Image: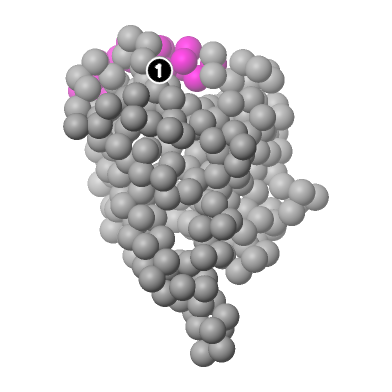
């Protein structure tokens, strides 16, 4: 049984029916390395069984939500088939836990949400962003492929592809106003108040019967057949890393 005190890169704060998961790797701008992804998995497993908790809020602090998967880890996977397999298995389990989590999730986004950090936000059921929030997929420029289906489910195929291919550098990153206009986020909050706004939204939602919210989440899962779609998607993405590996090794 995981103990909440065992976490190195997370802090969990429970407030009544809400649990805030604080990404706590500031020296790496909350980059989602294997250890942090595993801690998120363990936290979700714990919260799934906690009958008091109805809503989980992901928050990275005011300067950055998350800058995505750890560059060193991804680079290592490109140069090593063994590391590539480890990343594939770890990534698949991480996304599976997010897809299958049965309780409401809200992303409270401030600062940078890039790459896998952007994916994490979009995979949550709801998103609130501060005015200073910035979204993008710079990993595209380095040959890494992001998720697609989660964006398509929000904005449609063409616009999703544009978002992924056209937010690769600081000059093209998406700001909060653009994200709101495209329905990527649900609400904009003043800088410094995004977590407060997310807690307020969660408290309002939690006034509804638990069964109603659970049913809606299950309907979403059934409608998108999420796990099957994402599992296939991640396999394609990881095959891309294998190709990069072959090219790197001269294959």
Q: Residue at x 52, y 73 (%)?
A: 79
Viewer-closest of 78 and 237 = 78
The N terminus lies in which quarter of the figure?
A: top left
Span colored in magenta: 197-213
Q: Is residue 98 visible?
A: no
The percent coordinates of residue 42 (x first, y second) are 30, 37
From the image, tell me which residue sits under label 1.
Answer: 13
Q: Residue at x 54, y 19 (%)?
A: 195
Is disc 1 placed on a helix, strand or loop?
Answer: strand
Residue 166 sits above or below residue 101 on the image:
below
The percent coordinates of residue 115 (x first, y second) are 57, 51
User: Could you tell whether 241 is left or right of 3 in the image?
Assistant: right
Q: Main secondary structure of the magenta part?
A: helix
Q: Is residue 201 magenta?
A: yes
Neighbor class of circle 1 (other Cα within 10 Å; few <14, some 14-19, many 20+) is: some
Q: Residue at x 57, y 80 (%)?
A: 248
Of all residues, the one furthest to the bottom in this rendering is 251
Residue 49 sits above or below residue 159 on the image:
above
Viewer-closest of 69 and 205 = 69
Q: Is residue 74 magenta?
A: no
Q: Quadrant of residue 7?
A: top left
Q: Quadrant of residue 99?
A: top left
Q: Residue at x 37, y 38 (%)?
A: 39
Q: Quadrant of residue 218?
A: top left
Residue 39 sits above or below residue 224 on the image:
above
Viewer-closest of 20 and 27 = 27
The percent coordinates of residue 93 (x first, y second) are 31, 52
């Amino acid at each position: 049984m995981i103990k909440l005190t065992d976490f190195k890169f997370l802090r969990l704060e429970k407030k009544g029916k809400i649990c805030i998961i604080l990404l706590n790797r500031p020296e790496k701008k909350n980059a989602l390395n294997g250890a942090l992804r595993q801690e998120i998995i363990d936290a979700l497993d714990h919260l799934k069984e906690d009958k008091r908790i109805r809503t989980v809020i992901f928050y990275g602090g005011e300067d950055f939500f998350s800058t995505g998967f750890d560059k060193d880890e991804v680079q290592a996977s490109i140069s090593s088939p063994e590391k590539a397999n480890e990343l594939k298995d770890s990534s698949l389990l991480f996304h599976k836990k997010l897809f299958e989590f049965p309780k409401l999730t809200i992303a409270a986004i401030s600062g940078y949400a890039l790459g896998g950090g952007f994916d994490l936000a979009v995979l949550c059921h709801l998103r609130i962003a501060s005015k200073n929030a910035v979204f993008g997929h710079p990993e595209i420029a380095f040959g890494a492929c992001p998720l697609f289906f989660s964006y398509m489910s929000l904005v449609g195929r063409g616009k999703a592809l544009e978002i992924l291919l056209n937010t690769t550098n600081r000059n093209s990153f998406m700001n909060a106003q653009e994200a709101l206009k495209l329905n990527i986020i649900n609400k904009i909050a003043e800088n410094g108040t995004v977590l407060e706004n997310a807690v307020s939204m969660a408290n309002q939602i939690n006034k509804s019967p638990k069964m109603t919210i659970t049913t809606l989440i299950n309907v979403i899962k059934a409608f998108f057949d999420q796990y099957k779609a994402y599992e296939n998607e991640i396999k394609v993405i990881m095959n891309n890393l294998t190709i990069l590996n072959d090219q790197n090794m001269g294959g």
